[in-house]
Image: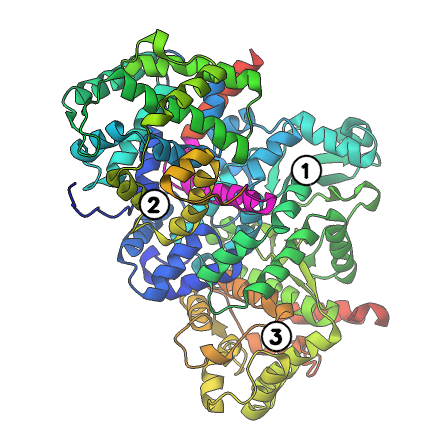
Amino acid sequence: MTADPYATAAGLVTRSAAAYVSGVPRSPADDGFFGPTSVTWRVSTDPATPIAGLRSLLMQALHPLAMAGVDQHSDWRTDPVGRLAATSAYVTTISFGERAAATRAAAHVRRIHEHVRGVDAVTGRPYAAGDPALLLWVHAALVDSAIAAGRLFGTPLSPADSDRFVAEMVVAAELVGVPRPQVPASLAELERYISSVRPELRCTPAARESMSYLLDPPGLDEDVAEIWQDVRRGAIGALPAWAREIYGYGAPGPLTPGQRTEIRQALGVLDAVFLGEPGVLEARQRIALRMRAARRA
Amino acid sequence: MRRGRPAGTAAWNPRRVAIAGIAAGAAGAIAAVVAARRRIGRLRFDRGWAALQLAVRGGARYAGSAPRLFAAAGEHRQRLRHDLALQTAEDVATTLGAMKGVLMKIGQMASYVDDGLSPGVRRTLSRLQDSVPPMSADLAAGVVEEELGLPPERVFAHWDPEPIAAASIGQVHRAITLDGRAVAVKVQYPGIAETIAADLDNVALLRRMLRVAAPSQDVGALIAELRDRVLEELDYRREARNQRLLAAYYDGHPTIHVPKIVGALSTRRVVTSELADGARFAELAGWSQAERDLAAETIYRFVFRSLYEVRAFNGDPHPGNYLFHGGGRVTFLDFGLVKHFTPAELQPLMQMARHLCVRQDPEAFRRSLEQAGFLRPGAPLSTATIVEHLAVFYDTIREPGPRTITGEYASAVVRRFFDVRSPVAGYVSIPRSYVILQRINLGLFALLGELTATADWRAIAEEIWPFVRGPASTPMGEAEATWRASRPAAAQSLA
């Protein structure tokens, strides 16, 4: 295990905002892989998105091989904010970008993954980032987290819309190289898949270390640090009980309505701060206009 | 809008941002205040400068009345926002729930003290305001119908479905009543009162934020005051009452005009008043200094006459709430945030002014500060120190003679007031009923500073002070005296 110190998380909001703005096209040639009537667009514009993002990182890190790949290969320690911003730019481009842009971004990720190989120190197992099994876990954690975060802190999806969302997202997994038949296409399939992976999950030292960093990132602007406490509480609260146990976070019990309100308020304030970053409001409006036009049509 | 001073001179002082904690408590304010408190803030400082420069380049959109007027936001933007119009009450809840409505309200309260907000906070609040689209014509019409019983085109002889201005939690439409009067109809966003009230019932987050932002303040009192004021403002009937009170008091006044309320067309979520037109605050930049001085004199008279005669203080001296007609004539708009004082609350304020300025008795001034709860009794400070630091608000009226209120002076007042390192800081607090007063005081200085207004403020104050009742000191004062003399005795003071 390397012990490089982590860089600070200063500028997290500004750089995430820039990443987001870069992912939302100005005059797109097509509606991309999802489009303005998709459940995916609705989920991606939900205020609970920051919690969905943190929860999915917490879930993803529990896979020792996925974690090892990040730990041993990425610039995560030296430039954590850049790393997170790159991820959010990627997710935004896949969700809202034109097909060509999304395909390009996915191809770029696949190329990077070719070089990410090694042996996990904890389990002794070899890994490759291009391994569909790992990619599928990362994908499933993201989809599951968006649903869970929306249910607790945003606009909950109906069962039918949850199914539609999972089905829509299949293409995202396919884009990074998971064969379509392997990707869960309904909520039930997603849940079955996650249960099937559970025996492999554990909290390796690398996972513990990087998640401790994420839950309490040093150097965050003070306003954001205050709000981040709520995002963290929300993300941990939205984890499945078994995942909290693996991390040893204990069982805090279900969040009270008051706590949930507080977290929702914090998301609102965070969103207000985000809106203050250049271009964010305009990007939001571009998306909202397309969704509205599609609804009218 | 042209600013009264170059961007670099006075605009960013880390200490000054403490006011954001007092009045705003928005997330950005916290960062600014924390950075200021630690007096590091290099990064924040740089960011602040960059944002400030941007704001200046972009015409300081938040300053002045621009953000409240859709028309001021440019053609393209107007179309964009219209396309995005809120269609349903759910849209309103989504857009303004989760503290956003609360932040907007609080931000609005803080916004007039331009220098009190760090550029970062100002940017955040301004964007938040920008992010709220108008109601669709149908949604607004629906509110009118729910409130007045009939759709707007039947309640009014003519109804303009395009809003002419954004109000903070609603929008303003033009209409002509069945009896032919041109009116402005303010329509509240449906569900907004419930949304904001729900957020204010859950103040754990707000309390934490304010504790970080303004550690020296009594956070509980601050929240209680904010909550009362915001909830009050959500009921337009109160606004109508306030406006009716002031319109009645100033009826026939030579320069002060308060539009009359149309009571039959005013309810909890709709308020109808005479339509007024005039120049916006931003346009005053192009007027002669003589005109600006007259406008400032009217605003000054309005603020202190309302305080001493009506015992009412308009808590929203936002530049967007004035229309200017030349010759010092000013129309005052928006009475959603009026604080009423009891005689007992007003008494200490008069005593303070009287002891310091008229009797020039510092010890008595100190005692009245203590009695009002501003200063802890027995503070180990010399009276001279106390006067030096707390008399700052009275600087323009301690001595007779013309004084010019500059932007620098206004900033200095704010800076001095919020100087946490001042020797008196540990012994001073603002009792709950005066929180709003101090904010408005600062807001008034900011406005007058923006106008670089010159007058013999002391002489004007003496005209108004009930304990002096001095002679008319200006032509406007003479016209005002004539107006007062012509009124029935009962109407001379509602206090």
As helix, strand or loop, the secondary structure at mark 2 comes to helix
Q: Is residue A97 above or below residue B323?
A: above
Q: Where A289 sits versus B488, above or below? A: above
Disc 3 chain ID: B
The numbered mark 1 sits on a residue in which chain?
B
Residue type, numbered disc 2: Leu
Identify whether B331 is placed above or below B424.
Answer: above
At label 3, counting other C-alpha atoms closer than 10 Å, the crowd grade (few under 14, some 14-19, many 20 or more) is many
Residue B460 marker: 3
- Residue B94 seen in this snapshot: yes
| Residue at 66%, 37% in the rendered image | B189
Name the residue at 33% across, 53% down.
Answer: B48
Which numbered disc, 2 or 3, marks the residue closer to the eye?
2
The percent position of residue B493, horizontal first and vertical second, equals 78, 71
Determine which of the numbered discs, if any, sits on residue B191 in the image.
1
- Magenta highlight: main SS: helix
The earlier-in-sequence mark between 2 and 1 is: 2
As drawn, the label of residue B54 is 2
Residue B210 drawn at (x, y percent): 50, 59
Residue A266 painted magenta: yes
Residue type beneath disc 1: Gly
